[in-house]
Amino acid sequence: MDELTAAGIIDPALRASYAECKRLNSLHGKTYYLATLLLPKAKRPHVHALYGFARYADEIVDDLASTLSIAEKSALLQSWGDGVLADIRRGTSNDHVGRALVDTVQRFNIPIAHFEAFLHSMTMDLSVTEYQTYDDLMEYVYGSASVIGLQMVPILGATDPAAYAAAEKLGIAFQLANFIRDVGEDLERGRIYLPLDELQAAGVTPEMLAAKKLTPEIKSALTFQIARVRRLQAEAAAGIKLLDPSSQPCINAASVLYCGIVDEVEKIDFEIFTERAKTSTWRRLKVALPAYARALRAR
């Protein structure tokens, strides 16, 4: 039985929308997609729907940068986002991505506030280029990452409400790991996501980052941020055990692989300006294969 049929998704138009979300996931979120394969078939399409929504918004903000002005992207994001939010409230959508999202939101009663927060953070990306403090950054990270975890929990299944707090922390850890890896790429987009006061405490200025040359000060700043990722990952670990057993192998694998980005940064000796830290296919398989065996047992 295919995933869509297993999830009870029969309508052809709805199936096409879910298929598009899955395509976006497999194309742009390879690690995320791999982890999703560890879920029972009936859960996977709904995770794809959440990813499709997030990815489409992200494409408006970043991937169209060479063809649209900030004002044009802002108008497009607001128009598309307002349309999807209106569809969620109405309970139906004709948007090629929104149709699957609305169906998932309805099935699992996911609060619309999570999607509003996400769109707020995407809007911030169009105008905010740096964050003075960690608390300032958390306004952005809540919408860009924490709410993704909160959206996922109803699909994954929770045995205790504490699973939601853990999902928020894991989402933050994932996002911070990406920030550490992508310092150089973000600079090219005119953004610095690492809190300026924490960089300053390590002796790092924006000008030093812009020079894209690794220094002892930058290495110290990255070491501080990596420790935070690992702390958040450890704090979230107990919450994974509060999910439905069939979902735990997926999230455990995602935790290892996403937070493992910081391990890869260390392996390249923090040379983030000249190399891209990435998880090897071997490591993905090393994590995924045992997790798949655990997933089968859990089912």
Image: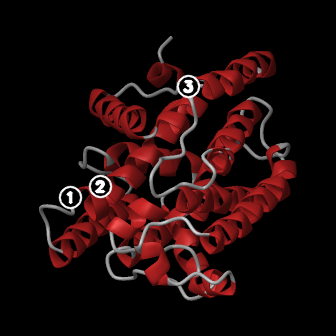
Q: Determine the residue located farthest toward the left in the rendered image.
A: 67
Q: Are marks 1 and 2 in contact (CB under 8 Å)?
A: yes
Image colouring: secondary structure
In the image shown, does 143 or 104 lie closer to the viewer?
A: 143
Q: Which mark is residue 64?
A: 1
Q: Where residue 206 sits in the image (x, y, percent)? A: 47, 82
Q: CA distance from mark 1 to mark 2?
A: 6 Å
Write down the residue under mark 3: 281
Residue at image point 42% right, 37% down? 25
Which amino acid type corresponds to the residue marked 2 in the rendered image?
A: Glu
Residue at image point 38% right, 42% down? 100
| Up-down relation of residue 233 to residue 209 (above or below) | above
Relative side of 104 to 122, left or right: right
| Up-down relation of residue 282 to residue 170 (above or below) | above
Q: CA distance from mark 3 to mark 1?
A: 29 Å
Label 2, secondary structure: give it: helix
In the image shown, does 141 or 90 lie closer to the viewer?
A: 141
Label 3, secondary structure: give it: helix
Q: Where residue 195 sits in the image (x, y, percent)? A: 59, 80
Q: CA distance from mark 3 to mark 2?
A: 25 Å
Write down the residue under mark 2: 59
* Label 1: few (<14), some (14–19) or many (≥20) C-alpha neighbours in 10 Å: few
Q: Nearer the viewer, mark 3 or mark 1?
A: 3
Q: Where residue 263 sits in the image (x, y, percent)? A: 69, 46
Which amino acid type corresponds to the residue marked 1 in the rendered image?
A: Leu
Relative side of 121 to 15, left or right: right
Which amino acid type corresponds to the residue marked 3 in the rendered image?
A: Thr
